[in-house]
Amino acid sequence: MEKRYIMSPGPTPVPPEILLTMAQPIIHHRGPQFKSILSEVREGLKYVFQTKNEVLIFASSGTGAMEGAVTNTLSPGDKALVVRGGKFGERWTEICMAYGIKVDNIDIEWGRSIDPDQIQKRLKKDPGIRAVFTQAHETSTGVKYPIMEIGDIIHKHKNTIIIVDAISALGAFDIPVDTWHLDIVIGGSQKALMLPPGLSFVSVSHKAWKFVERSQLPKYYFDFLKERRAISKNQGAYTSPVSLIMGLKEALNMIKKEGIEAIFNHHKRMSAATKAAVNAMGLKLYSKESPSEALTAIEAPEGIDGQKIVSIMREKYGITVAGGQGQAKGKIFRISHMGYINTFDIIATISALELTLKELGYVLELGSGVKAAEEVLYHKQ
Amino acid sequence: MEKRYIMSPGPTPVPPEILLTMAQPIIHHRGPQFKSILSEVREGLKYVFQTKNEVLIFASSGTGAMEGAVTNTLSPGDKALVVRGGKFGERWTEICMAYGIKVDNIDIEWGRSIDPDQIQKRLKKDPGIRAVFTQAHETSTGVKYPIMEIGDIIHKHKNTIIIVDAISALGAFDIPVDTWHLDIVIGGSQKALMLPPGLSFVSVSHKAWKFVERSQLPKYYFDFLKERRAISKNQGAYTSPVSLIMGLKEALNMIKKEGIEAIFNHHKRMSAATKAAVNAMGLKLYSKESPSEALTAIEAPEGIDGQKIVSIMREKYGITVAGGQGQAKGKIFRISHMGYINTFDIIATISALELTLKELGYVLELGSGVKAAEEVLYHKQ
């Protein structure tokens, strides 16, 4: 009978309307009914990505699409620059290395952002860099990167493209793909798009398609050219995950109806309320600069294990937040604001956090976090 | 208000119980609740695959797992033998070639099966062949291959493994993975496992793991070693498609409860009834030998377009059967018996086929197909 809250930065809660849409009878992936759904989904994805270009859809987790972004744009021996400031930056490096790409890493202290000048300098030093890989924000640290500025820099280099992992950012904060000249942007279903995990999305710019056409790395399942041909006929190259795509159509309609600007504002509000609560409770953000509006990464207080906070919140209060990953494991915990998270999900989470921390011996006034959150919510409508 | 029947060889109908299981609230992919589900799923998959070895799970269509089977077992320049008797045999060749594998094809006329001696001879001629790729049955032609015999041959070659695409066969007819010494066997969610598309499965034998450990082809998302480490801890390497896996648990429980032998018999019965109807209606099977029990592939009568049969059945009667693929397009149509298909789904399909063929000018006595099917169903309990 326990009511459960999933407040992790993916997977996120799925609205019941979408869950029930996906419980409809299966339809054939090459039939007219599915083609009509996919045609609507294509337009909806362009709206969310803020692009005029086609957005490809894969049946995979986001990592699959990240691999596709590497194998479809580069060739053996190519050079890449990776912004590495957390677990997902590390993933870019790993994927590139698995395919024999020469990787130059810009290592950032976890919890810090990047100065776009660093990228400018590296590109100047080595104009042979074919692609710059980054996250829109680093989900493992809660830090947002200056993608507009990085996009601007790379736009001026005609032999270099920018590839952005926006899996947990897309639909949570503003990433206008075309305006910012972002060549490849990757999204995932299980974040702000309010769906179960299982779908990934890739937008490809005109400039990036030229890279794709010349790319010599091996690929098959994540072949962008093959998927572009298929989706132009409102199909996938292989069997589309029809249930998830029926849910996607519903999710995109909900997003359109609300308006993407209103949704970004909602995320800002949830984020501001949470961060105010963190501050009022005497806790510290793990993100030392540019904290993301899509999640809040918080340091566990001195002497308290972050994983312990996560497990008490889950076991005793039914609220699933995420722990730290990699080098941050045990040191932090993370609260998501992505997608179908409302005011009182945030209030419940802060309340549970207060109760949990008190139980663990941390000195705080009960209600202080909630009060601070409410102040923000009241004044920032 | 039209009642619809999906009778295509994937995706197949999903029982309402499973659809509603998947409509449950999202849970976290690293939490204890999900780990407990995955632990049960692992046992269930071993039951369906009839193996003691671990079965890996990927968020992808079956093609992704096929690619993984190539990239995880072979190294650049390795030689492979492909049984190519339809669209899915062609896919093995395409994947191998995308990764620089030297492919020797055994080309079979579409609609025919393979003599295992051909494989024996090729292996004798070229003992350097590292892997033999085949289908359990070719879904595009409805022909079943002698997998037991092929498995026996390859078992005797210690430097060669057999890799079987059983995506649309697994759970429909008997493929005892361990008994038949099948090194890698691939399954998919959207066939006899009664789930939506979006999951693929791979069993890996002890012998095949040695190939995996030595393999030098590049891979990342479909990395078998990484998934083996993850699943041993009841997790996926990346974000697991939690909804589909909740559904999988339910599907595997239903299969266990029914018993895999009973399920194979059910498929045989559905298949025999359909094939008797085809015969009674004066139609010809496209499968000239070893017709599969998982589907029935039927030639369109002289002068009638197979695609026309498919579209009338769908538009006028709400019954989706599949057309032909590749060189069989327009020439054939295919009726699935996979998974959640019962007696009266088959009767409805045969009835709609009679009405459709009559409309298209084919001379037949209405009811003759259904009568023949009922005769089989009555006598073959």
Image (cartoon, coloured by chain):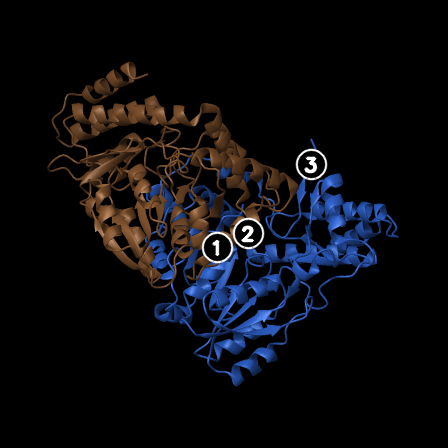
Chain colours: A blue, B brown
Residue under label 1: B223
Residue A319 in the figure: left or right of residue A107: right
Q: What subunit carries mark 3?
A: A
Q: CA distance from mark 3 to mark 2?
A: 28 Å
Q: CA distance from mark 1 to mark 2?
A: 9 Å
**Mark 2 neighbour class, 10 Å CA radius: few under 14, some 14 to 19, many 20 or more:** many
Q: Is residue B100 above or below residue A77?
A: above
User: Does residue A146 appear in this view?
Assistant: yes
Residue under label 3: A3
Give the farthest residue toward the bottom: A125
Percent x, y for residue A290? Answer: 68, 67
Residue under label 2: B237
Q: Nearer the viewer, residue A70 or A265?
A: A70
Write the residue at 42% across / 63% down: A53
User: Does residue A18 appear in this view?
Assistant: no
Percent x, y for residue A278? Answer: 78, 56
* Three-letter amino acid code of the residue under disc 1: Asp
Q: CA distance from mark 1 to mark 3?
A: 37 Å
SS at mark 1? Answer: loop
Write the residue at 66% across / 62% down: A292
Q: Are marks 3 and 2 on the same chain?
A: no
SS at mark 2? Answer: loop
SS at mark 3? Answer: loop
Numbered marks: total: 3
The image quadrant where one finds the C terminus of chain A is: bottom right
Q: Is residue B240 above or below residue B10?
A: below
Which of the 4 image quarters holds residue B75?
bottom left
Write the residue at 19% across / 47% down: B327
Q: What subunit carries mark 1?
A: B
